[in-house]
Amino acid sequence: MSLFDLKGEVAVVLGGTGELGGVAAEALAAAGASVAVLGRNQPRGEARVAAITEKGGKGIFIQADALDKNSLEQALERVISELGAPTVLVNAAGGNSPEGTVTTDHPFEAIEAADWQHLFDMNLLGGVMLPCQVFGGYMRKQGKGSIINYASVSAHTPLSRVVAYSAAKAAVLNLTQFLAREWALEGVRVNSITPGFFPAEQNRSLLFNPDGSPSARTQAIWEHTAMKRFGKPEELGGVIVFLASEAASSFVTGTDIRIDGGFLSQTI
């Protein structure tokens, strides 16, 4: 079990105020890391830190905007001051919006350039690029670090409707591999994970009918998922700890690990 002991590590979880990012924060804390939860929603961030400390872990919340480099630089200074030099970065910020989604009433040709750019900013610029510049750049100077980016099944095969989100997440995979190659000799490993379908606040209304029964989209997802179910948020934790641990994954960089119940392995 010493392979997964993160005592002495300092982890930064950007987007740790969300459900799937929060799972990463709690898993890292449970493995012994000191965790900084970064996000814009203070009540959610403080609630996540409370959940960590109630279980005996160490965590702080720092309000930060992933799209504001200055905000991230200030967050880095606080992390160093209050917890120590960051050695793990989890980039879990991102999301989708109706404006970048194709529907019968909103075809691809109707997507505005500004809405397309907004989703790339959310998922690529703020989701990976700026945090990697700020925290990854610091890790390079220290000669030690593990970066874990959140991709998506839609990065591998574009899902119906979510065209801008799919394109942005595909870029996340590409940037992950680029940074892994660039920083391989500087002590910084860069990997990504591909969560499958996990019900969360932002997609629950699409997955379940008002009476709680599965929607038609859910039925389609389950039909295409080898395990015929959604993932549970806690099922992401083990992979996060594995990639964060230098002892467990010191020769792993530039890879993507799928936690999708076999979604991307399923054909007709």
Image (cartoon, helix red, strand yellow):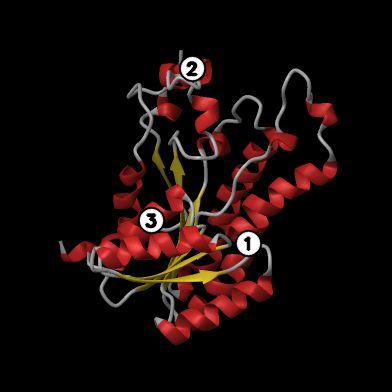
Seen from the viewer's position, the closer of residues 247 and 197 is 197
Residues at circles 2 and 1 in contact by the CB criterion of under 8 Å: no
Q: CA distance from mark 2 to mark 1?
A: 33 Å
Density class for disc 3 (Cα within 10 Å; few <14, some 14-19, many ≥20) is many
Horizontal side of residue 16 vs 132, given as left or right:
left
Name of the residue lying farthest toward the top: 268
Residues at circles 3 and 2 in contact by the CB criterion of under 8 Å: no
Say which label, 3 or 1, has the lower sequence index.
Answer: 3
Residue 235 in view: yes
- Residue 14 in percent (x, y) is at 51, 62
- Residue 215 in percent (x, y) is at 49, 18
- Residue 42 in percent (x, y) is at 53, 64
Horizontal side of residue 202 vs 165, given as left or right:
left
Horizontal side of residue 177 vs 112, given as left or right:
left
Q: Which residue is mark 2?
A: 220
Q: Amino acid at mark 2?
A: Ala
Q: Amino acid at mark 3?
A: Ala
Seen from the viewer's position, the closer of residues 110 and 141 is 110
Query: Which residue occupies 47% across, 72% down?
Result: 185
Q: CA distance from mark 3 to mark 2?
A: 28 Å
Q: Is residue 87 above or below residue 192?
A: below
Q: Which residue is mark 1?
A: 129
Q: Which residue is mark 3?
A: 24
Residue 205, located in which quarter of the rendered image? top right
Query: Which residue occupies 45% across, 53% down?
Result: 21
